[in-house]
Image (cartoon, rainbow, N blue to C red):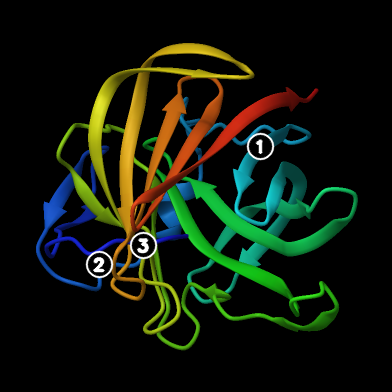
Amino acid sequence: MRTARLPAAFLLALTCTAAVSLAATVPQEPPDPANFTNPVANPFFPLVPGTTYFYESQTADGLERTETTVTSDTKLISGVGITAIVVHDVAFLDTGGMTFLIEDTQDWFAPDNFGNVWYLGESTVAYLYDDNWNLTGTSTEGSWEAGMNGAQAGFIMLADPRKGRAYQQEFAAGIAEDMAKISGVNARVSVPYGDFTNVLVTKEWSPLSPGDVEVKYYAAGVGLVLVEELKGKGTVRQELVNVTGP
């Protein structure tokens, strides 16, 4: 995930009830496995196995295509004792005649009994190329797993998203330190896949990448429909173009 320089934010931590309250310290409390026995689906972050989301964005290097598939696979995150749903992301870059694999990632998410969706880690491989698009190697930088080497789970989506709430999405010191804040709950968005109202808007940043920010738009019953990457004076729009599923 990407980044921006913003003031220090509060974290959201689960209480023993369905509520999520503001906390003032990092790290937050680890998730309790007892809160994942009867998970409640979150309309803004549905995790329906067999669903694939197709996104496109026009970048300086070419057309980037991302395919995000909610798989039927699960992974036991042993460090916290919770079984996560595996979501597979693959990103390609079309430079105008040639297509290159640029990233292959497995993300691990788990909804809890209250409707919050936890982010429990990721295994990512980035493919590196020279100026002539010759593959020079790969990188697993950014990979982390909750409960391992000090890494801690965070929230990817709240059960009760209210404007102004801020929360830690992931924490692995020096590797993944993304934060988010809800900046709107009733936006309108148009993307190739459709027109949406009452859209949830989040702003995401990380102290590891000062100056970068992502604004994400979520439609109830669909999920992520638009990402605006704000870098310097430019904005890159990653738009939802299609959804296939069961």
Image vertical order of residue 102 relative to residue 35, above or below: below
Type of amino acid at the residue the image marks with label 2: Gln
Q: Amino acid at mark 3?
A: Thr
First reached walking from the N terminus: tag 1 or tag 2: 2
Residue lying at 27% horizontally and 37% vertically, measured from the top left: 18
Which residue in the protein does label 2 denote?
Answer: 28
Q: Earlier in the sequence, mark 1 or mark 3?
A: 3
Q: Toward the viewer: 236 or 66?
A: 236
**Which mark, residue 55?**
1
Q: Quadrant of the C terminus?
A: top right
Left-right relation of 14 to 107:
left
Residue 34 shows in the view: yes
Q: Which mark is residue 195?
A: none
For residue 15, say whether it is visible.
no
Number of labelled discs?
3
**Relative vertical location of residue 80 with respect to residue 38 in this rendering, above or below:** below
Q: Residue at x 34, y 67 (%)?
A: 30
Residue placed furthest toward the right: 97
**Residue type at tag 1:** Tyr
Q: Crowding at label 2, few (<14), some or many (≥20) Cα neighbours within 10 Å?
A: some
> How crowded is the residue under tag 3: few (<14 C-alpha within 10 Å), some, or many (20+)?
many
**What is the secondary structure assignment of the residue under circle 3?**
loop
